[in-house]
Amino acid sequence: QVQLVESGGGLVQAGDSLRLSCSASGGTFSYYAVGWFRQAPGKEREFVAAINPSGSTTVYGDSVKGRFTISRENAKNTVYLQMNSLKPEDTAVYSCAAYQTFATTFRPSLRIDAYSYWGQGTQVTVSS
C-alpha cells in the first residue's frame, strides 16, 4: 500500500509558475500510475494530469493542456506537476492519487474512481 504526500503549493500571481511534488512511500512506485486532481470551493473534483508507471505516456485535462507538465522520477519515488502561466481559475486544492498496475506502458486513467490511494492535498492560490 502506497502513501502519498504533496508539497509545493502556495500563493502566486497570475502568470507565475509553481511546481508541485508528490512523494510516495510504502510500495513499489514503478508499478503505480499517478494522477493529479484539483478541487475548488463549491466545485467537483477535476482531473488535471496523469502519468503511467514507466513515464512514457501522459494525459492532461483540457483546461491545463499546454500549461502544465507532469513527470516522474521513479528512483526518487516522486511525481511532479510543473504549472506555468497560472490563472486565477487554477486556484484549488491539488491532490495526487495513485493506482497499481502492471501495464506500465499503457495510457493512465482519467477516472477518479480508478485511483485507490490519495494524498492530503496542497493549496494553490493564484491572485489576479
Image (tube, rainbow, N blue to C red):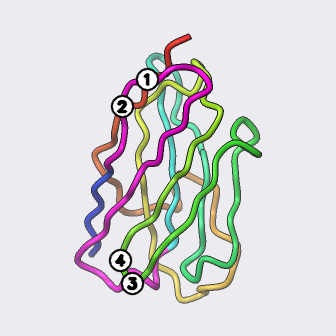
Image disc number at residue 111? none
CA gap between label 1 and label 2 equals 6 Å
Q: Residue at x 56, y 30 (%)?
A: 16
Identify residue type, mark 4: Lys
Could you tell which of marks 1 and 2 lies nearer the N-terminus? 2
Could you tell which of marks 3 and 2 lies nearer the N-terminus? 2
Indicate the quadrant where residue 103 lies. bottom right
Magenta-tinted stretch: 7-32
User: From the image, which quarter does the C terminus lie in?
Assistant: top right
How packed mark 2 is, by other alpha carbons closer than 10 Å (few <14, some 14-19, many 20 or more), is some
Q: Which residue is mark 1?
A: 125
Could you tell which of marks 1 and 3 lies nearer the N-terminus? 3
**Membership of 47 in magenta stretch:** no
Identify residue type, mark 2: Gly
State the image coordinates of residue 15 (x, y, percent, origin top left).
62, 26
State the image coordinates of residue 114 (x, y, percent, origin top left).
53, 62
Q: Which residue is mark 4?
A: 76
Q: Which residue is mark 2?
A: 10
| CB-based contact (under 8 Å), mark 1 and mark 2 | yes
Identify residue type, mark 3: Ala
Q: Which residue is mark 3?
A: 75
Number of marks: 4
Task: Label 4, secondary structure: give it.
Answer: helix
